[in-house]
Amino acid sequence: MPFCKLLRQLKIDPSDRWGRSIDFLHRPDRFRDLLDRERMRADRGHTSFSLAVFTLPIDDAEALRILIRLEQRLRLTDHAGFMDVQRVGVILWNTSEDGAWEFVSAMKDLFEPHEAKAEVYLYPTYQPPNPDRPGDDGTSTDLRKRPETQAAEELFVRRMPGWKRAVDIVGACIGLVLLAPLLALTAAAIQWTSPGPVLFTQKRDGFGGRPFTIYKFRTMRVGADAEKAALRAQSEQDGPAFKMTNDPRITPLGRFLRKSCIDELPQLWNVLRGEMSLVGPRPLDSREMARCLGWERRRLEVTPGLTCIWQVYGKPKAVSFKDWMRMDIRYLRARTFLHDARLVVNTVFSVALNRKNS
């Protein structure tokens, strides 16, 4: 059986073909588990790790030669495994970016006479702001020193299942059509009662941390965003997020729109564009997201949504920011059609009951 064909059947132990010569390499599913574990260790211990990824030659014999010699270069704390059919990764525990590139440079002679095609991923790739750190200007810092070093966070993103995207498209189209009269009436009411644009736009962090523009009906007076810093001390939500029940910037109509969640309806356009989903963690302001800790940023592994667990079970109880983030991360492990449907139904009931009791 050819080497590459064998790797396509990665559920089969490579030693079935090559004896025990490369049985130190983990299969992709097991290697993914090791990456997840290393990330959790780094988050818990506030440490970092690097991942060196090598592209193997197409020639089977040359690929096998490289893999056999690779084992001799690994430390006891390193883990190696298949990323896919043609690439092998090495997890370098507690290794800096510079250390990873030194490792890659030391491996180049293994590939001769072939060109050593390698990539380096670093985790984490940012440093949250710390008021106790001298010179901190309140913005996150990218820890990558070299432009060619990639963010390891990109390796953990979870692509949207086909069924979920289909539901989003159908749901957004139906919602925009059926709610068109309400959307038009709301837009007219905003123009009539408050000077300024009908829509409020803001940069939010979406899938994989990529920023996008979110759309909402404007519920505050013009220039309200500039007043946020002065009101920060009165925020009722701990952590980087800002929540204030009696926010003086909100217009009378805006309070109704927020209570009824009508202000969120323009985000059906974000859903239709694929920037959001009907169900998923609510996207945070990019400035707030930049202040989140490493483990809290796992919520960026999936497409953000209109509603999620926090909107149904957490928001009325004013849970802590960390518990809010834990609810979002819990959703990552339970992204099924039935779970999404249950959250949508519960969101409708939650909004209705909230309006009835207000």
Image: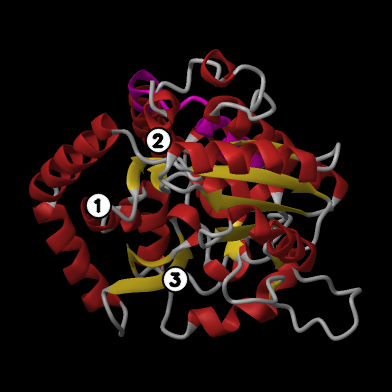
Is residue 282 visible to the viewer in this orientation of the structure? Answer: yes
SS for callout 2: helix
Q: Quadrant of residue 180?
A: bottom left
Task: Please name the predominant secondary structure of the magenta segment in the image.
Answer: helix
Tell me the quarter of the image containing the N terminus: top left
Residues at circles 1 and 2 in contact by the CB criterion of under 8 Å: no
- Using the image as rendered, state which of residue 120 and residue 292 is in the foreground: 120
| Disc 2 packing (10 Å; few <14; some 14–19; many ≥20) | few
Residues at circles 3 and 1 in contact by the CB criterion of under 8 Å: no
Residue 29: image x %, image y %?
Answer: 54, 26
Q: Which of pointers 3 and 2 lies earlier in the amino acid sequence?
A: 3
Q: Which mark is residue 356?
A: 2
Residue 179: image x %, image y %?
Answer: 14, 48
Residue 36: image x %, image y %?
Answer: 66, 36
Q: Which mark is residue 203?
A: 3
Q: Amino acid at mark 2?
A: Lys
> In the rendered image of this protein, does residue 241 appear above or below residue 130?
above
> In the rendered image of this protein, does residue 109 appear above or below residue 24?
below
Q: Amino acid at mark 3?
A: Lys
In the picture of the structure, the residue carrying the numbered disc 1 is: 268
SS for callout 1: helix
Q: Which residues are magenta?
A: 324-340
Q: Quadrant of residue 245?
A: bottom right
- Using the image as rendered, state which of residue 164 and residue 76 is in the foreground: 76
Q: Which of pointers 3 and 1 lies earlier in the amino acid sequence?
A: 3
In-image side of 284 versus 191 (left or right): right
Is residue 320 visible to the viewer in this orientation of the structure? Answer: no
Name the residue: 38% across, 27% down. 2
